[in-house]
Image: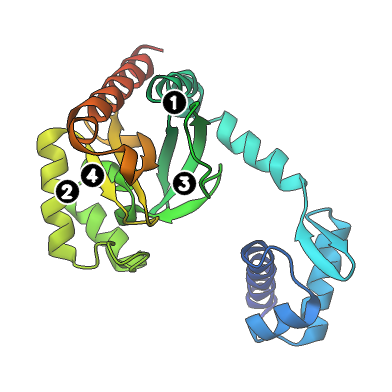
Amino acid sequence: MSIGVTSLKATKTTLEIINSVQELNGAGVSELAERLGKPTSTVHDHLRTLESEEYLVKQDGTYHISARFLELGEQVRSRLKVYNIARPEVDALAEQSGEHANLLVEEHGRGVFVYKSLGPDAVQLDTHAGMRVHLPTTALGKAILANRPRHEIDEILDRHGLPPVTKNSITDREELFDQLETVRERGYAVDDEERLPGMRCVAAPITDNTDRAVAAVSVSCPKSRLTGKRFEETIPNMVLRSANVIEVNLAYS
């Protein structure tokens, strides 16, 4: 085996270990070796290297992601023009709606939460900066997909599929395309318990001067608080106004 191939395999193993430690919210050597199907000695060597380089910390035999990733993540976020421009508008949307407001971008075919803001009545959700989700399971993701060309959407679906995150998740490609057409017609997308049971979400795309979605903004709240006119008119209008303000600021900043 060539040195180049060996190095690539080692790099892949390192990344698999980091991802597994994150997904498991901390793990020991044996647990990781079993999960990855790697020799314990190999996993241990990688863990020791990651710890010495300060990417992992060890507590009572369990390895955790270190705070160094906060520095890396904040650097990534701060270079995103849409984050810097949208942040005050997302805060205003949360205050105006009283609910949970979000900003999401697409990366490698997944939705990535970039920022969230909590209004006075917001419930606590699992979302956080850097969290990745399947685009079709969220109103945010559907708002982005609806403003992308068909071949891009097909590539994303071929890569990530349509997993049933909840019983309401869309699992049929044609049903998804029907919904995306509706999103394009009315300008905003909805998520009716498609990622989180009991929660509804309304999202609008943030597009550039070519009408390509670069991000999406949304309001999420319990289904019991998002019904009737509030679901069909009040919140959609708030979200659409916020998206428009962000788009204008992006265009002329």
Name the quadrant of the N terminus.
bottom right
Q: Which residue is mark 2?
A: 180
Name the quadrant of the C terminus.
top left
Q: Position of residue 13 (x, y in %)?
A: 67, 73
Q: Nearer the viewer, residue 122 or 185?
A: 122
Callout 2 environment at 10 Å: few (<14), some (14 to 19), or many (20+)? many
Disc 2 to disc 4, C-alpha distance: 10 Å
Residue at x 16%, y 48% (from the top left corner): 180
Q: Earlier in the sequence, mark 1 or mark 3?
A: 1
Task: Name which residue type carries label 1.
Answer: Ala
> Which of the two discs, 1 and 4, sits closer to the camera?
1
The secondary structure type at the circle numbered 4 is loop
Task: Name which residue type carries label 3.
Answer: Val
Q: Which residue is mark 3?
A: 112
Q: Earlier in the sequence, mark 1 or mark 2?
A: 1
Residue at x 44%, y 18% (from the top left corner): 92
Q: Which residue is mark 1?
A: 94
Q: Which residue is mark 4?
A: 148
Task: Name which residue type carries label 4.
Answer: Arg
Disc 1 to disc 3, C-alpha distance: 19 Å
> Which of the two discs, 1 and 2, sits closer to the camera?
1
> Which of the two discs, 3 and 4, sits closer to the camera?
3
Query: Is residue 2 toward the left or the right of residue 237 in the image?
Result: right
For residue 221, which quarter of the picture? top left
Q: Earlier in the sequence, mark 3 or mark 4?
A: 3
